[in-house]
Structures are given as C-alpha cells and as structure tokens.
Image: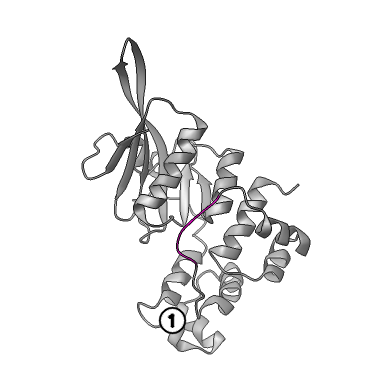
Amino acid sequence: MIPPELHAQIRRFVYAEHWRLNTIATQLGVHHDTVRRAVESERFVRHGAQIRPSALDPYKAFITATLEQYPRLRATRLWAMVRDPGLFRLGHPGQRYVRTVRPAARAEASLRLDTLAGEQAPVDWGNFGPLRVGSTTRVLSCFALVLSWSRGCYARFALDQTLESFLRGHVEAFTALAGVPRTIRYDNLKSVVLELAGHYHYAPQPCAVARGNEEGYASHCTSLVGCGVDLL
C-alpha cells in the first residue's frame, strides 16, 4: 500500500507539475509501478476544467533539479541552459515557475507572508460560541479558507467540526473560488487530508508549532465581510 504522503506527492507531480512517470520514479526513488498505481487510483470524484499542457512542461524537471543544486541561479541563466529564451521572458509563466520552485534560504527569519496569486491558502476552523437551535444549544463553527495573496476568503458555517464537514468545506471552497491553491497549510495533517490533496493535486503543509507568522489568516477570520458564507 502506498503511504498517503507519497500518494499525494506523486499525484501532485503528475497533474500539477506535469512531470513524467519515469522522472517521478527516479526523483522519489520508487518503482515505476508505484507511480502508476498512485496515478490510476481514485478516491474522490472531481468535475472541472482539464489541465492544459504547457510549453514549459518538458523543462520543469530539469529546472527543479538544477535549482536544488544551484538555488541562486537566475532565470536568465536557466533559459540559456535550455536554449529557449521565450519561456523566461518577463511576465511569462516560465519566470513565475522559477520563483515557485526555487529553494528557500536556510536561514530562518520572521517575515510578512508574501506569496504569488493562487500559491497558498491556510485552512482552519473558527469558533463562534453557542447557538440556540430549537430546544437545544449547539456550538457554531466556521470553516475558513483564505487566499494568502489576495486575502480572498471562503467561509462556511457548521454546527459541528466533523471530518465530513471539513472535507466538504474544501470541495465547496474550490468550487466557489474556481480553482485550487498550489499549497494549503494546516495545523496538523491527517491521512484523509493527504488523500484529498492527492486527488486535487495541491501540496498540504503543516504550520510550525508556535509560529504565528505561518498561521496565515484562516484562524483569525472572525470578520466575514466579503466572504461567501453558507450554513452546512
């Protein structure tokens, strides 16, 4: 059985990064059959736009591997290496792609969260206290997904914090926002979240413990002005 983390990573490399199966098997050190099983397995059903091939696709594996070895290499030098300068002209997706895969500096610093459009979104539950429902009192919760770049928010009220409500919040947020962030950050990662990430081809990342600058805005989304809000 393929571990959830590996399953999600393989599917992201195939459908989001457009790597070839042989490249993925080599980079992850797994058998080709393992990669094929991860691609062929389906747990969720997704209806939406199909991923279109890009002229950059044949070079992505090379760019990623080169930046791992030489993280400060400029995009201009990369296009000279692949002999296709048009891919990395100013504003072209090739230049933006280099920024997204360039390894971060190892020295830690507390910086303002600054990402590309559609690059990252934190997800969390918010607590809104007791709510009278008929003759009983329930706790009102709110699922919130906030886009880090635009601060665009999708929020959905619920009378529970069950796993079903959590997953439904993701799926309906993707539908409402007409897309899936490249990376979604969580307080903790559960196996079912990894399966969801494997299907929707995003990278799930845990927030570091006691690092307020990494939590984003989802956990502080108490003002829902401008958000799409529904009741589960």
Of residues 71 and 107, the one nearer the viewer is 71
* Residue 186 percent location from the top left of the image: 48, 41
Q: Residue at x 44, y 55 (%)?
A: 180
Colouring: one colour
Q: What amino acid is labelled 1 in the image?
A: Phe
Q: Is residue 174 left or right of residue 83?
A: left
Q: Position of residue 140 (x, y in %)?
A: 34, 24
Say which element carries label 1. helix
Quarter-of-image position of residue 25: bottom right
Q: Is residue 208 above or below residue 202?
A: above
Give x and y (percent) for residue 58. 58, 79
Q: Is residue 115 above or below residue 96?
A: above
**Which residue is at a point 50% across and 77% down the rendered structure image?**
54
| Residue with the most extreme top position | 135
- How dense is the environment of label 1, judged by Cα within 10 Å: few (below 14), some, or many (20 and up)? many
Q: Is residue 113 visible?
A: no
Q: How many marks?
A: 1
Tell whether 152 sits left or right of 211.
left
Magenta span: 45-50
Q: Which residue is mark 1?
A: 88
Q: Is residue 208 visible?
A: yes
Asked whether 9 or 73 is in front, the reply is 9
**Which of the 4 image quadrants contains residue 229?**
top left
Q: Main secondary structure of the magenta part?
A: loop
Q: Quadrant of the C terminus?
A: top left
Camera-nearest residue between 60 and 193 = 193
Residue 47 in the magenta stretch? The answer is: yes
Query: Splitting the image into 4 quarters, where does residue 145 fall?
Result: top left
Residue 35: x and y, percent? Answer: 71, 60
